[in-house]
Amino acid sequence: MRLRALVHTLVLALAAAVAVTVVPTAAAGPAAGPAAGPAAGPAAGPRQAAAPATFTHPGVLVSRPQLDFVRSKVQAGAQPWKAAYDQMMASSYASLTRAPKPREIVECGSSSNPNYGCTDERQDAVAAYTQALAWYITRDARHARKAIEIMDAWSAVIKDHTNTNAPLQTGWAGASWPRAAEIIKYTYTGGWPDSGRFATMLRTVYLPEIINGAATKNGNWELIMTEAALGIAVHLEDRAAYDKAVSTYLGRVPAYVYLATDGSTPKPPPNSSIDTRDEIVKYWQGQTTFVDGLSQETCRDFGHTGWGLAAAVHTAETSRIQGADLYPQVSERLRHALGFHTKYENGTAVPSWLCGGTVKPGLGRVTEVGYNALHGRMGISMTNTGIYTEAHRPSGTDNYFVSWETLTHAQNPN
């Protein structure tokens, strides 16, 4: 673990010396069918992907203005926020008697088999975030102290993640931990003596495992890992890690969601050995017809695709809070992808050219943040996504890294 942390430090030191230029995604041309809406307006000009000069806190997935909006809606008994809040508070994650289950080594094989601490870690991270949200909305300090108890329990014990799913597991838990830590550190005035130890845990145990991505894995891996890396970078105020996460993100999103402007085949994932058409088709689960919004994992199943899209949206949301908004560069891909998959979730017949005429639905309740950002704030028409999102409220938690997003992001203008 110490060797990996040293390598991570050297990699980021090199990254800090290299300027990263962000080039906006090209316009997507005419909309492709009912899943699509109008384009998001003129493309942004070239810009630097530099981390902000001053980080915004709390600033991982949710900001203070967003939290204030949610709190006001819950206090007023307004819907859908009150129902979403009640759902959260009725869950075991919000229990004040919850006992954390930290482990020194979390070992996770494929599909979390073996599962030595995998479920416990993910769920404790979700619980810490849940308790932090409960603290902010209720101002009941017991929830803040419970969040601290959970985070302190893990930072005192964990040393490493092992086995084949270690990078993905680190991303799942690593996406939730900094959300919780941001809210507690920057809004709770009762004190958190071991916040430095928790930050050290993120820097030495989590960040080295995820910062270099996973180019040849299915795209949801790298997107989840990148979301976690960006959130951790914000909490640590680590500019080199932030820039590296953004660079990985801007390479992976175009390799995960196809647009017709990409050409006859999708873009290959950067830093991978996948480059010929045959290799790309195999990587895209054997799909040979490519249309706007198709994902690299569409023909695998909609569940993993939903995770990839959720992580892509979460990363853009954090960047927006930090003042370097990535949405203009990925909005065309995200709105097409969300519309494409919710169209079939809503009941549209699957054509024969798509995945051999059969798909595996189960996108999950992952559309709330993207629908709010793209439709609510940017004004993009997203009929299918809107129908799906409203039909699946309140969104709850998937017990991995998508949690309480109707509560935090439904119709949230901030």
Image (spheres, grey):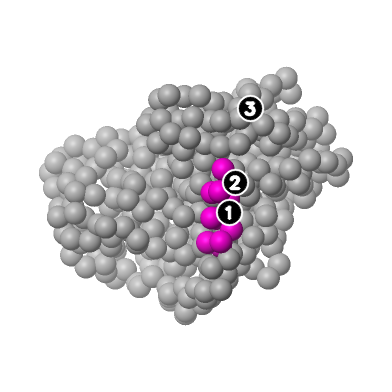
279 left or right, relative to 65: left
Q: 370 and 115: which one is in front?
A: 115
| Vertical comparison of 184 with 40: above or below | above
Discs 1, 2 touching: Cβ within 8 Å: yes
Quadrant that contains the C terminus: bottom right
Three-letter code for the amino acid on which mark 3 is drawn: Pro
Q: Secondary structure at mark 2?
A: helix
| Vertical comparison of 249 with 303: above or below | below
**Numbered mark located on residue 2 in the image:** 2
Q: Which residue is mark 1?
A: 6
As for residue 278 lying within the magenta part, the answer is: no
Three-letter code for the amino acid on which mark 2 is drawn: Arg
Between the C-alphas of marks 2 and 3, the distance is 20 Å
Q: Of all residues shown, which one is farthest toward the bottom?
A: 45
Between the C-alphas of marks 3 and 1, the distance is 24 Å
Three-letter code for the amino acid on which mark 1 is drawn: Leu
Residue shown at 56%/61% (left/top)? 10
Q: Secondary structure at mark 3?
A: loop
Between the C-alphas of marks 1 and 2, the distance is 6 Å
Identify the image quadrant of residue 136.
Answer: top right
Report if residue 96 is visible in the image: yes
Q: 48 and 382: which one is in front?
A: 48
| Vertical comparison of 30 with 334: above or below | below
Q: Secondary structure at mark 1?
A: helix
